């Protein structure tokens, strides 16, 4: 994958220090000569992820960033462009969950936390990624990580579900607005994936097959982060050049229902 000038692409993975984001960073490092930048709020966790990913390629670095703060987002994007000249692919993976509980049992603080990261954070990242891609004049590709919870009801996951429903609308509207600038904006929409977040929500260990959750998935198992990364990598490639405003569901059939 190369940009319009035939040089290395710059790939920004928001929330790339863990879970799906780290899997996406790994995929781009394994398959291209691209420069990959990962972000996260936890400095130690980010540096650990950077060290792990540098076993694949030296072309990765971590920037500490809180997606809830416009100043953080602007600063990191400015630093990346100053050093590398562009942002050609951006994957927005940062997300948080809330405790598994009915809507009336959840607290205002939980609503604010989930919405501020999953929706406001995605909006802020897209806003400044799009501005940079417009300045580049040849566009770029933005992929948001949504969820099947944004396509259907999720009992005991109401706020998380609402944040992902909103992200679906935000992504499609942004895709419509900026397609004429050569910017392709899409979602990859996972079901249950073996990540620290999913394990916390389900109350299972990282190595657990979790029979309770698997019975709801036609594929008979949870996904792994490599499977999500494959979808993101393809969505960012020239092979998906005419796909705009789409939600690519990668869920083992979970959204089909029981």
Image (cartoon, rainbow, N blue to C red):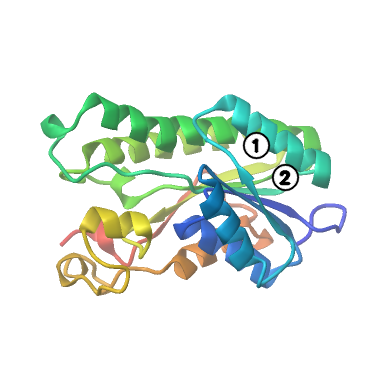
- Identify which residue, 161 or 258, lies in the foreground: 161
Residue 219 in sight in this render: yes
Q: Which residue is mark 1?
A: 129
Q: Where residue 66 sits: x, y (%)?
A: 53, 35
- Identify which residue, 76 or 128, lies in the foreground: 76
- Identify which residue, 216 or 200, lies in the foreground: 200
Q: Where residue 207 sits: x, y (%)?
A: 31, 74
Quarter of the figure with the C terminus: bottom left
Outermost residue, right direction?
5
Q: Is residue 176 above or below residue 49?
A: above
Q: Where residue 20 sits: x, y (%)?
A: 47, 58
Residue at the (53%, 67%) spot, across then down: 230
CA gap, disc 1 to disc 2?
7 Å
Mark identifier at residue 239: none
Q: Is residue 62 above or below residue 128?
A: below
Count residues near mark 2 (Cα–Cα under 10 Å), then give few for <14, some for 14-19, many for 20+: many
Q: Residue 163: name its quadrant.
A: top left
Q: Which residue is mark 2?
A: 87
Residue at the (56%, 60%) spot, across then down: 49
Q: Residue 103: name its quadrant.
A: top left
Residue at the (78%, 44%) spot, across then down: 86
Residue at the (58%, 35%) spot, across then down: 126
Q: Is residue 133 above or below residue 218?
A: above
Element marked by disc 1: helix
Residue 16 in sight in this render: no
Element marked by disc 2: loop
Quarter of the figure with the N terminus: bottom right
| 1 and 2 marks in contact (CB < 8 Å) | yes
């Amino acid at each position: 994958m190369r940009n319009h000038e035939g040089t290395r692409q710059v790939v920004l993975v928001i929330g790339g220090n863990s879970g799906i984001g780290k899997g996406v960073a790994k995929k781009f490092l394994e398959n291209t000569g691209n420069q990959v930048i990962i972000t996260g709020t936890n400095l130690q966790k980010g540096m650990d992820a950077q060290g792990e990913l540098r076993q694949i390629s030296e072309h990765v670095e971590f920037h500490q960033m809180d997606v809830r703060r416009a100043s953080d987002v602007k600063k990191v994007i400015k630093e990346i462009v100053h050093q590398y000249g562009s942002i050609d692919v951006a994957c927005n993976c940062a997300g948080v969950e809330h405790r598994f509980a009915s809507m009336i049992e959840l607290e205002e603080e939980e609503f604010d936390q989930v919405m501020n990261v999953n929706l406001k954070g995605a909006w802020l990242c897209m806003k400044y990624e799009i501005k940079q891609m417009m300045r580049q004049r040849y566009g770029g590709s933005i992929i948001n990580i949504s969820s099947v919870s944004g396509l259907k009801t999720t009992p005991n996951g109401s706020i998380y579900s609402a944040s992902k429903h909103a992200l679906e609308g935000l992504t499609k509207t942004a895709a419509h607005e900026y397609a004429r600038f050569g910017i392709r904006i899409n979602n990859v929409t996972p079901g249950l994936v073996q990540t620290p977040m999913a394990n916390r929500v389900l109350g299972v260990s990282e190595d657990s097959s979790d029979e309770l959750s698997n019975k709801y998935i036609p594929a008979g198992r949870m996904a792994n982060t490599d499977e999500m990364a494959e979808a993101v990598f393809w969505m960012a490639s020239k092979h998906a050049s005419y796909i705009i405003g789409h939600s690519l569901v990668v869920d083992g059939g979970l959204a089909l229902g029981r």
